[in-house]
Amino acid sequence: MTAWRQAGLNYINYSNIAAKVLRRALKPELRTEALKRDESHVRITPWANGKPAHLQQAASK
């Protein structure tokens, strides 16, 4: 059995941890570009009755 499985991780979690460790170990001039690849943007669209539901914007204070 692999070490990451014995630690209770799945492969996705293991590979994410390994990627973060590798990015931190890079030289500073290479680290900046590598850290940009670590960012992700997610957009969530709620669905109702088989169609995307539009969210109303909350009033700002």
Image (cartoon, rainbow, N blue to C red):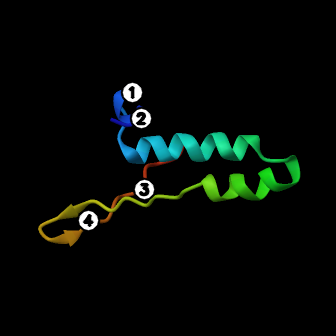
Q: CA distance from mark 1 to mark 4?
A: 41 Å
Instruction: Report the side of 24 relative to 53 (left or right).
Output: right
**Within the image, what quadrant is residue 40 found in?**
bottom right
| Residue type beneath disc 3 | Gln
What label sits on residue 57 in the rendered view? 3
| Residue type beneath disc 1 | Ala
Depth check, front residue: 55 or 17: 17
Q: Badge 4 local density, few (<14 within 10 Å), some, or many (20+)?
A: few
Mark 2 and mark 3 lie on one chain; the one further toward the N terminus is 2
Q: Badge 1 local density, few (<14 within 10 Å), some, or many (20+)?
A: few
Q: Which residue is mark 1?
A: 7
Q: CA distance from mark 2 to mark 4?
A: 40 Å
Query: Which secondary structure lies at badge 2?
Result: helix
User: Residue 28 in the image: x percent, y percent?
Assistant: 86, 47
| Residue type beneath disc 4 | Ala
Q: How many marks?
A: 4
In the image, which is nearer the foreground, mark 1 or mark 4?
Answer: 1
Query: Which secondary structure lies at badge 4?
Result: loop
Mark 1 and mark 4 lie on one chain; the one further toward the N terminus is 1
Depth check, front residue: 43 or 48: 43
Q: Which residue is mark 2?
A: 4
Q: Which residue is mark 4?
A: 53
Which residue is rendered at x = 51% and y = 45% of the image?
Answer: 16
Q: Are marks 2 and 1 in contact (CB under 8 Å)?
A: yes
Q: CA distance from mark 2 to mark 1?
A: 5 Å
Instruction: Report the side of 18 relative to 50 (left or right).
Output: right
